[in-house]
Amino acid sequence: RKEVEQDPGPFNVPEGATVAFNCTYSNSASQSFFWYRQDCRKEPKLLMSVYSSGNEDGRFTAQLNRASQYISLLIRDSKLSDSATYLCVVRRDAGKSTFGDGTTLTVKP
Amino acid sequence: DTGVSQNPRHKITKRGQNVTFRCDPISEHNRLYWYRQTLGQGPEFLTYFQNEAQLEKSRLLSDRFSAERPKGSFSTLEIQRTEQGDSAMYLCASSLVQGDTEAFFGQGTRLTVV
């Protein structure tokens, strides 16, 4: 079993839709959590950190449930430019980060 | 450009040859990470440095792989006796030590072993 698991998708949604991605992690000692975005053949870039209280950045909302070891990302009012692969990232300490294999989103006109 | 820089961007090599990649992190970042990514997978941790000290190395990293960061600035990743299974994107990232900080990635070096 992988340490970080994501539904690979693909998720194909129309513009304006709301879409949610889930991620589970197995190491209960994990301390920090992130969502990264990766465009095709590009490097990953930080989308947002994830906090226990939940956090929002514009159309993006991230939630963390430590008891269930579950992280989510909600995208509201999807744009064509949101099409990408979304990587769930879990960090045990200040060093190594473990990435999920990503969830692919395609937003269609 | 003040981001993470990796060279070369692409490398094609014959099986059995040695290759070396270079990463220049963001200048004030003291942590430097190497990852490997293959198609359809997320980045896979290889190793990381804090300043010049190599603090962790993945069990996936065979003895053909070695990384250095001699002066705590740039880093090199060498693969000896390359195999076709080494074909991948090699990503470097850097971050600050303190706090819950973002790791910034370079654009990667795409290795193809033929």
Image (cartoon, grey):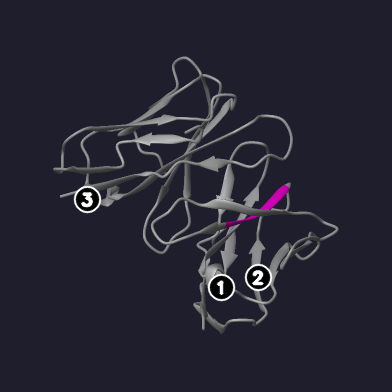
Labels 3 and 2 positioned on one and the same chain: no
Task: Please state the chain letter of the residue tagged with numbered disc 3 in the rendered image.
Answer: B
Q: Which residue is mark 1?
A: A7
Identity, as a three-letter code, of the amino acid under mark 2: Asn
Task: Point out the tag, 1 or 2, that comes first from the N-terminus.
Answer: 1
Q: Nearer the viewer, residue B63 or A17?
A: A17
**Residues at discs 3 and 2 in contact (Cβ within 8 Å):** no
Q: Which residue is mark 3?
A: B84
Callout 2: few (<14), some (14-19), or many (20+) C-alpha neighbours within 10 Å? some
**Residues at discs 1 and 3 in contact (Cβ within 8 Å):** no
Rounded to the nearest angstrom, the CA distance separating label 1 from label 3 is 28 Å
- Per the image, label 3 sits on a secondary structure element best described as helix
Residue A35 magenta-highlighted: yes
Q: Nearer the viewer, residue B28 or A25?
A: B28
| Residue A93 spot, x, y in % from top left | 68, 39
Q: Nearer the viewer, residue B60 or A102?
A: A102
- Residue visible at 72% across and 40% down in the picture: B100
- Residue visible at 57% across and 68% down in the picture: A6
Rounded to the nearest angstrom, the CA distance separating label 1 from label 2 is 7 Å
Please determine whether, in this image, residue A9 is positioned above or below residue A2.
below
Q: Main secondary structure of the magenta part?
A: strand
| Residue A9 spot, x, y in % from top left | 51, 76
**Residue B44 left/right relative to A76:** left
Let me know if residue A30 appears in the view.
no
Please determine whether, in this image, residue B78 is positioned above or below residue B13.
above
Labels 1 and 3 positioned on one and the same chain: no
Identity, as a three-letter code, of the amino acid under mark 1: Asp
- Per the image, label 2 sits on a secondary structure element best described as strand
Task: Please state the chain letter of the residue tagged with numbered disc 1 in the rendered image.
Answer: A
